Image (cartoon, rainbow, N blue to C red):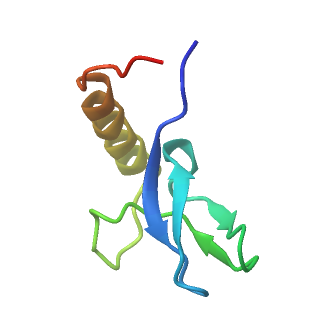
Amino acid sequence: MSRATFFVQECPTCGRSLEVRVDLLGKLVKCRHCSGRFVASDPANTSATLVSDSAILERADELLATVESMPSRPR
């Protein structure tokens, strides 16, 4: 059973930190606190240019590899 991987992004409307699933990178999401809508973006990519789908997938793979290399926590 796989678990979803998240990154933290600040809502541009209310400023709250949100956990956003990696598979939502580049997609329109809604803040669960204020209902503000914004495009989920990788905080490590500070570029103002649009990112291609392949670049988003590459970054998602990098983030997943980082998580997979971490020691698993006991449940």
Q: Position of residue 23 (x, y in %)?
A: 54, 42
Q: Nearer the viewer, residue 41 or 10?
A: 10
Q: Position of residue 60 (x, y in %)?
A: 39, 41
* Residue furthest top as drawn: 1
Write the residue at 48% across / 18% down.
75
52 sits left or right of 27 in the view: left
The quadrant in which residue 32 appears is bottom right
Residue 52 against residue 67 in the figure, above or below = below
Q: Nearer the viewer, residue 7 or 60?
A: 7
Write the residue at 57% across / 69% down.
39
Q: Position of residue 2 (x, y in %)?
A: 54, 19
Residue 20 against residue 73 in the figure, above or below = below
The quadrant in which residue 29 appears is bottom right
Residue 51 against residue 71 in the figure, above or below = below
Q: Position of residue 66 (x, y in %)?
A: 25, 33
Q: Nearer the viewer, residue 32 or 64?
A: 32
